[in-house]
Image (cartoon, rainbow, N blue to C red):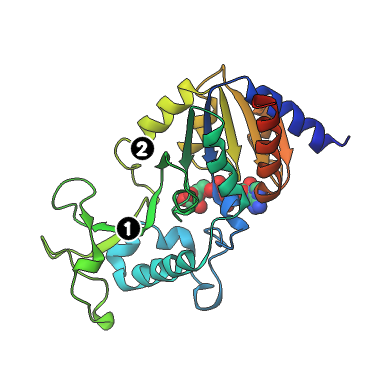
């Protein structure tokens, strides 16, 4: 038996004894669907732009058209891809445990499209929109389909309430997480028996702190590579999420429903 199989069986055994599962996910779980990571999205026309200079409120104020077009390109790509076996395996966990909650840093909506019923979107959702001025209170949602089509030369559409620009409903650098999202994720982690940490480098806070909030939870990392939080995991599955998560779920199923 190799190290991955040993780790997988041990992780499955630890998971099978609990009832509440949380999965903290990042860009790695969507990589096999073909969603470029934040940094990988810089191809072709966009290669000369630094994402950290596009994903900020200041950048949008300076050049709304540029930032809008970058997000429009990324949202269009997300619309073309499908959930992969990793997303589907997390959905399958709902048949085995009474509580399965996903706290994702991804903005691609693939967990929801895979059928997962409790998804906390820590960094927002690239397919939704809000008023840049928050004119009806924090995170004023805007339904783009209800707006008249706009002149692309003029830049982003305008909020129907106040006339400010409409922006993507994602969390930009320097912004707070959506109200309630972090609280909900922290509460879920505090109550979890097992926390899966999947496809995240563990570099971006506050999401990176979530797996460590509950000292009693078993922590299982699924990642192709070693990360800065790997050594704090009880089990480490060095494999792609799409390959290993279905196997992990199968192994847990055999233990819970022998
Ligand atoms: N399976 C498992 N892990 C993978 C796979 C895969 N197929 N492909 C890549 N990975 C791992 C990488 O080894 C890396 O550790 O996924 C991780 C991706 O790390 P990041 O690109 O830093 O993504 P993430 O942790 O989600 O970043 C957090 O930072 O870019 C901002 O706001 C953005 O939400 C994002 C946040």
Residue 169: image location, x then y, percent = 32, 55
Q: Quadrant of the N terminus?
A: top right
Q: Is residue 98 left or right of residue 168?
A: right
Q: Which residue is found at the position 37% from the left and 31% from the top?
A: 184
Q: Residues within 10 Å of mark 1 (few under 14, many from 20)?
A: some
The answer to whether any part of residue 205 appears in the image is no
Q: Is residue 94 above or below residue 34?
A: above
Q: Nearer the viewer, residue 122 or 243?
A: 243
Q: Position of residue 72 (x, y in %)?
A: 39, 69
Q: Residue at x 36, y 56 (%)?
A: 56
Residue drawn where x is 41% and y is 69% of the image: 70
Separation of residues labelled 2 and 1 (CA atoms)? 16 Å
Tag 2 residue: 181
Q: Residues within 10 Å of mark 2 (few under 14, many from 20)?
A: some
Q: Which residue is mark 1?
A: 128
Q: Earlier in the sequence, mark 2 or mark 1?
A: 1
Quadrant hosting residue 167: bottom left
84 or 223, which lies in front? 84
* Tally of numbered tags: 2
């Amino acid at each position: 038996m190799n190290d991955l199989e040993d780790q997988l069986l041990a992780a499955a055994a630890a998971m099978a004894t609990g009832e509440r599962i949380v999965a903290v996910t990042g860009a790695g779980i969507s990589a096999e669907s073909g969603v470029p990571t934040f940094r990988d999205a810089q191809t072709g026309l966009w290669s000369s732009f630094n994402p950290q200079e596009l994903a900020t409120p200041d950048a949008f104020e300076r050049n709304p058209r540029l930032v809008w077009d970058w997000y429009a390109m990324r949202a269009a790509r997300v619309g073309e891809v499908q959930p992969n076996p990793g997303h589907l395996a997390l959905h399958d966990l709902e048949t085995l445990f009474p509580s399965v909650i996903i706290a994702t840093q991804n903005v691609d909506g693939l967990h929801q499209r895979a059928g997962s019923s409790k998804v906390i979107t820590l960094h927002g959702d690239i397919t939704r929109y809000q008023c840049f001025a928050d004119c009806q209170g924090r995170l004023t949602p805007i339904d783009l389909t209800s707006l008249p089509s706009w002149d692309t030369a003029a830049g982003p559409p305008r909020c129907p309430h106040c006339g400010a620009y409409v922006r993507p409903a994602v969390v930009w650098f320097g912004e707070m997480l959506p109200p309630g999202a972090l609280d909900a994720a922290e509460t879920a982690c505090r109550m979890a028996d097992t926390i899966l940490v999947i496809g995240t480098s563990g570099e971006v806070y506050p999401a990176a702190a979530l797996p460590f909030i509950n000292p009693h939870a078993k922590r299982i990392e699924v990642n192709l590579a070693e990360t800065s939080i790997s050594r704090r995991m009880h089990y480490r599955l060095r494999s792609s999420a799409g390959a290993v998560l279905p196997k992990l779920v199968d192994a847990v199923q055999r233990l819970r429903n022998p």
